[in-house]
Image: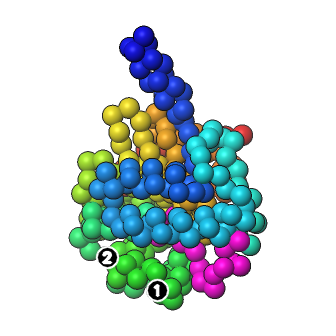
Amino acid sequence: MLLSACADTQTAQKQKIPAATYMGGDNTSAEVCEALKDAGASHVDIFQDWVADFADSAGKNAKLEDNWSDPQKLKADTGKCMDGWEQDHTYSDADCRMTAFLLLDGMLTAKSTEKRYKGTYLMFDTDAIDTVDRYEIIKKKKDMFTTLYGEKKVTDNKHPETTFSDSWKDYGFHIDSDRISLLSIVISDPDSDVVFVGHTGILIKYSDYYLFVEKIAFEQPYQATKVRTIDELLHILSLRPEYFGDEDEAGPFVYNNGKYLQTLKKSV
């Protein structure tokens, strides 16, 4: 009977994947942060403060729940999130790039960086980093931040998916971890003939599943998602229309630590 009960418990646990949470309370936040610490992520205490701050303001206003649910059914009222954040804060919230960069601090390195960012795609990121004290850790490595995430000129129009990979190699980016990697969705802007990191998050590898931790966008929720495979995660991400342009536009392209995985296909 005990063996049967154990088997049933294991089956139930497997049935919960895929699962996702907005970390709207202490229980899910603590679980995700414990996983981050176990994997060796940096500044998990600061991340937990950011999550709690969002949950107590934007999250409460949008009634974000403190549980795991079906990722495809997880919906947040972004207008209420924005209103809730702005009621309690006079400064900018973090976004996906800033959150991932914080958690990778120390294990993400580069052999060289662009010394001055001249682009415009990261202007909201850099404004927040320059003006808000809570982002001081990112500010200290802002050149690395903008080099990693900023727009890059496409030099091979037949293979624009190589641009981000080439940049990763050219600047010598490396993540010193066998469990944590950086998953990035790179958007192509055909009008300017550049690509840039439109979304990103950190991926933690377990023996039989993955945990993806992200901040969806400025004044939108933090999210943690458990999946069995990377393809399962990409399907979940493909349900977000904001990553897609016109049908004839290249991309968006998906990378894991700078390695091209595939072109994301829009799901409905």
The residue under label 2 is 113
Most foreground residue, 151 or 109 = 109
Residue at 45% across, 35% down = 229
Q: Where is residue 2 in the image (x, y as percent from the top left)?
A: 40, 15
139 lies left or right of 262? left
Label 2 to label 1: alpha-carbon separation: 23 Å
Q: Crowding near pointer 1: few (<14 within 10 Å), some, many (20+)?
A: few
Tell me which label, 2 or 1, sits earlier in the chain: 2
Most foreground residue, 243 or 214 = 214
The residue under label 1 is 133
Image vertical order of residue 133 relative to residue 177, above or below: below
Where is residue 43, by image quadrant? Answer: bottom left
88 part of magenta stretch: yes
Q: Where is residue 249 in the image (x, y as percent from the top left)?
A: 63, 54
Tag 2, which secondary structure?
loop
Indicate the amino acid at tag 2: Thr
